[in-house]
Image: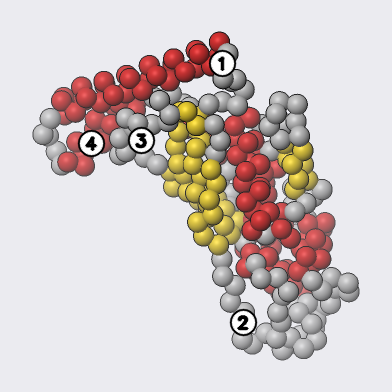
Amino acid sequence: MQIIREPRVTVLARQQFVYPEHINWESDSEVAGEVVAEFAGRLCYLSFGEDAGLEGGHKSIPGRTTNEAYLANILTTKHGSVLEHAVWSMLIEGVSRTLTHELVRHRAGFGFSQLSQRYVDESTIGFVLPPEIEEGTGAFEVWSNACEASLSSYRSLLAEMIAQVGDHGTPTMRKKRARQAARSVLLNCAETKIVVTGNARAWRHFCEMRGSPTADVEIRRLAVAVLGVLQNEAPHIFKDLRTVDHEDGVAIIDSSHNKV
């Protein structure tokens, strides 16, 4: 039986910023998400500089010429709407169905595509060890035995359902009918995979909410992993979020600018 101990977060897609030819302005950042957030903020006030080539007034922001400084001001003033233009798609693996039941509740600013237990044969599925359970303890033995029994029951039930369904219907429908019944005996800690697309504001909210010390420990661990990826992707948007050691061994997330 496969036991999974850590989530895996992989960036699948990021934006490309295309500079408008009729606007004479350029950011010093090469990160598209940071640039589009800055551009959106500057457009609100036409603050591209006197030589931008736009008609109308131009409101400059003294001392805030760099992308880093501009976005720092965005965070301070909580002008979070401009962060909604920056988007990342991530592949998240090594997490449980328990976790994704909570993850998909983050509806605003997110899109989700999750592995289908109805279609995919889960005969070799892994199980995600809850962070609170220590290996070598009585609790681990109880958990491990439950997972083994669940997997054994799935395989047996799947074989029975395949025989029961027989040759009725298309091959795809036969698979679904058998596997949708067999999945009923799998535990909530069964591993799943999910593609998540979210804008920067939504990702910040996820990290703040699920990085809280009161959050479920598994999803808090994921929030910390996601934050690490996002800080590498766009430090000017996410660097104020920071991880702090916690007594239960899984870090929490703190912020200088919450609820942007």
Q: Which residue is mark 3?
A: 117
State the residue in front, 7 or 80. 7
The answer to whether the residue labelled 3 contacts the one labelled 4, judged by CB atoms less than 8 Å apart, is no
Amino acid tagged 3? Gln
Q: Which residue is mark 2?
A: 20
Q: Where residue 20 sits: x, y (%)?
A: 61, 82
| Residue tagged 1 | 136
Q: Mark 3 or 2 closer to N-term?
A: 2
Q: Residue shown at 44%/15% (left/top)?
A: 145
Callout 2: SS = loop
Location of residue 198 in the rendering, given as x and y in whole percent from the top left corner: 57, 53
The image shows residue 115 at horizontal and vertical percentages of: 40, 42
Q: CA distance from mark 2 to mark 1?
A: 60 Å
Dot placed on the residue nearer the N-terminal end, 3 or 4: 3
Q: CA distance from mark 3 to mark 4?
A: 11 Å
Mark 3 or mark 2, whichever is nearer to me: 3
Q: Residue 44: in sight, yes or no?
A: no
**Amino acid type of disc 1?**
Gly
Q: Is residue 145 left or right of residue 139?
A: left
Question: Residues under labels 3 and 2: Cα distance?
Answer: 45 Å
